[in-house]
Image: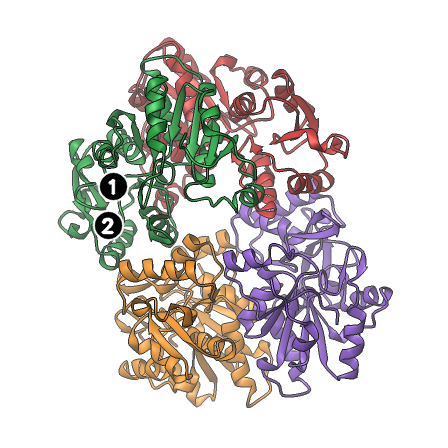
Chain colours: A red, B green, C orange, D purple
Amino acid sequence: MQTTCFKTVLEKYPIIFFDGYGVIKNYKGMVPGVEKTFTWMLEQQKEYYIVTNDASRSPMQLAESYQRLGLHIDHERIISSGMLAKEYLDLKVHDGIVAYLGTENSAHYIESMGLHPLAVREIDETNIDQVNALLFLDDEGFDWNYDLNKTLNLLRKRTIPAIVANTDYAYPVMQNEVSIAIGGIASMIENIAGKEFIHFGKPDSQMFMFAYDKIRETRTITKKEILMVGDTLYTDILGGNKFGLDTVLVLSGNTQPEEAETLIKTTGIVPTYICDTAAI
Amino acid sequence: MQTTCFKTVLEKYPIIFFDGYGVIKNYKGMVPGVEKTFTWMLEQQKEYYIVTNDASRSPMQLAESYQRLGLHIDHERIISSGMLAKEYLDLKVHDGIVAYLGTENSAHYIESMGLHPLAVREIDETNIDQVNALLFLDDEGFDWNYDLNKTLNLLRKRTIPAIVANTDYAYPVMQNEVSIAIGGIASMIENIAGKEFIHFGKPDSQMFMFAYDKIRETRTITKKEILMVGDTLYTDILGGNKFGLDTVLVLSGNTQPEEAETLIKTTGIVPTYICDTAAI
Amino acid sequence: MQTTCFKTVLEKYPIIFFDGYGVIKNYKGMVPGVEKTFTWMLEQQKEYYIVTNDASRSPMQLAESYQRLGLHIDHERIISSGMLAKEYLDLKVHDGIVAYLGTENSAHYIESMGLHPLAVREIDETNIDQVNALLFLDDEGFDWNYDLNKTLNLLRKRTIPAIVANTDYAYPVMQNEVSIAIGGIASMIENIAGKEFIHFGKPDSQMFMFAYDKIRETRTITKKEILMVGDTLYTDILGGNKFGLDTVLVLSGNTQPEEAETLIKTTGIVPTYICDTAAI
Amino acid sequence: MQTTCFKTVLEKYPIIFFDGYGVIKNYKGMVPGVEKTFTWMLEQQKEYYIVTNDASRSPMQLAESYQRLGLHIDHERIISSGMLAKEYLDLKVHDGIVAYLGTENSAHYIESMGLHPLAVREIDETNIDQVNALLFLDDEGFDWNYDLNKTLNLLRKRTIPAIVANTDYAYPVMQNEVSIAIGGIASMIENIAGKEFIHFGKPDSQMFMFAYDKIRETRTITKKEILMVGDTLYTDILGGNKFGLDTVLVLSGNTQPEEAETLIKTTGIVPTYICDTAAI
């Protein structure tokens, strides 16, 4: 399959959205050569954002994780699905307890809004009636057996919104090894409970809109000026396309070079360009 | 079930989004008393929009259909899923033929963008290679048997985006009678072809964002100032909630008064308020 | 990919189940060389059955269609999904009208059981209350637009079982051209109506059980003695495996030689053998 | 809603299939009065079977659990989904390791067939290549977090059949409390892995066929002589209907008396009779 030179593509767009995992970094660290891309974008005064399905950490902590790889990305440049969940709670949940599945760290978000977070394991008869929302944040920080059963029963007893702050079903942990993500767990509970949850994350447009709105606070742009770079057809490319952006599929992550063409054909999800990596 | 007085709710919000069918009008004409709501909103300088899953007509024609019922609604106040499909084509399809299923009337949109619309029935060996997108617009205007088979085979031959301009599966045509909508037909083709289509319409956030953006062109608002009024939990209320709006479920359309409470409980889709109708 | 010699496989099993389309015949006629397989099976006193998702014709008519290709297959050797639908009606519907979608020809089945078949188009206010079942038989013989809308409204008015006599979503009509099958149409109506239909056809075990029972009327066998030969992983191979049969995937129909290995890996549906064709 | 006298229904059928949980017993013990039904059936020489989605115990152990409630049911009268999984392994897996999720107790089945069971947690680089099947037996006996991630990665590395020995998504543990069943867990893994698993359990016909075959070993019967008694529309009633049996929905378990009529109407799953309980 013929791929396009990534630099040639970049040159056409003043604003670039990047997926994080599989594009900028992977299980081994930085994707080789990507640091040059960021240096070049700085020189060229390109504006960029990381648009990522991640609710396990704050943008500040995500920025630190890039820093540790040697890449300086300002936390203001990071848009995560966790930020959408935060906005939802801010707009729609005014008081009471927000029950959550995730690490204590991921729950800091809830506290920062003046809401009272409570780990699902700590729900009991004395507080269950104050629980006004359920939040799926991270696959870590709780006992899957005990807490998932408790979550299912919470939803049977209380008619409250359930918010999933990451739509991913799995994430890579090393070469050929993946881990079940909170999005996969939440979908199981959704199926068993027979309810409709509120899911935040790519391919949903709200992720892209959040970044788009952030840019427009300071300047006037159109969607034609934005390029979305991702490694996954179902999230980055489908979502970017639907939002009206031009899209690049890179082959450094989820999509193997030898399967890209077949996958595009069978899914009907067509990126504007295909490039080997986001390195230049 | 205890319902809330609609006027009391309206008074709290400067901006109101209305679903059309089942809220303002139904198979018999105007929902009784709704004209008073619009008169009152005019007096009170409330800003309102009709946010509707409809791609069969232009906003201009939709406005005319309200006019015929005796309700003057400016076409600038109407946001339809067809407008999102139009924006997609404008941003993402730069040349070639756009094949469509729908009436000739619904295809005028495509033409107005300088693109070349072609009814699926007219695709043949001489033009199939120029087809760059497939658009599902309306359930009328084509032969279901002949044209749906042709559509399926088009998608097997050409790797092109398929855009569904209305997510509804069915729509009411008279009391206790519904008609299959283009959204239901498109989902059948999507399942058989095994591809991912691009769907525009509630509950997807992009509908609400389009209206939200339109307002913000002229003034600064927050989502807290907007109320969404709808008759369907899965589209109006789920979508409104997810976008961060307060929501009213009215019982004049899709959701029967006697089933509302059970439906809210089993689906977990919770409106901010429940009112009998949008009449005041 | 390494394929196995079909004759070597056949020799191990006294009883063989064949899928029809894609294995014995295709859009051009007989799969080349398959007639020799049948001659050889006759000499070797192998017992065989055609197990096919087809409700458009009786076994007698299906036998005739093989006869026209030059292959003599006794109608007693043909097990179709239509026969399961017939058994269901025989056991579960004792009187009244059976509404159907399909050709008049396909409806003869219903009549032969002493039940009163009525094409959906002929349902009206005088007879709708006598309709006790709905049967999806064939994609031909009715007006898709008019009759499918009528079918949907029938299911909203009457709480009756809906039986789908063919699980296939599409069937090939010529090279690279398929046609939507009644199974695909029925699934659309099922989704829109939100009801559970009763589906007969592979991969469901009931198809294999029907053939298995037929054999056991005259002799004692075990499942280990039966081989299922098919061209489709999702129906023939998944169903055969689940029923406990050894299975052969042939590459003369639905599954292309170059994609077989990838498909087996991604679906996890593993045939016991892979052979080029059912010819020997 | 008008219910029918259970005894009047029983009298019409020489053979009765019972679901276990929700029909004969519940979280508190025996459903009151059901012991009289079994005494009466003994006197009347009715033949009965328990047809249950349960793979956590052998029929012998299931019989003991009824014994402890004071009900003598011969283990020969118990047909479980675990028996179908056992038959599958017996027919289709001839050697190597069968990896499983469940208690050691539930794994005895595998051993009894001469196959080598291995808990998922014990899979490592030295034995993974010998794993020839994966079996979902029970929701207990393993660490959900560690072992489910390991299961997902096993399926990414080895193209092997995955067998789910219980289709239930959840099971009741006390009034208003449920527990996630292995069927729900398996469906999550199936969705994330994107593979097709083999599911055994009601509503699948194979459960009913297994019981039907068992009876026919000793006598000749027809499906018209069999009544299926269950408390769940989606499993007992849908499956019984599809297999061609007359069905009774009892209101002592999963289906609440006040919701029965609505559920039948919305699902389109229609039992032949509705009775309060299986007590006489």
Measure the alpha-carbon separation of dots 2 and 1: 9 Å
- Residue labelled with disc 2: B140
- Quarter of the picture containing the N terminus of chain B is top right
* Relative side of D132 to B111, left or right: right
* Relative side of D142 to D265, left or right: right
Mark 2 neighbour density, 10 Å: few (under 14) some (14–19) many (20 or more): some
**Would residue B258 be visible to someone looking at this image?**
yes
Q: Earlier in the sequence, mark 2 or mark 1?
A: 1
Vertical order, D104 against A47 (above or below): below
- Quarter of the picture containing the C terminus of chain B is top left
Residue B113 appears at what percent x and percent y? 18, 31
> Which chain hosts label 2?
B
Marks 2 and 1 in Cβ contact (< 8 Å):
yes
- Residue labelled with disc 1: B56
Looking at the image, which is closer to me, B47 or C113? B47
Q: Amino acid at mark 1?
A: Ser
Vertical order, D114 against C112 (above or below): above
User: For the point 56% across and 19% down, which residue is it?
Assistant: A62
User: For the point 47% across and 15% down, which residue is it?
Assistant: A77
Residue A89 appears at what percent x and percent y? 56, 24
> Which chain hosts label 1?
B
Residue A247 appears at what percent x and percent y? 35, 30
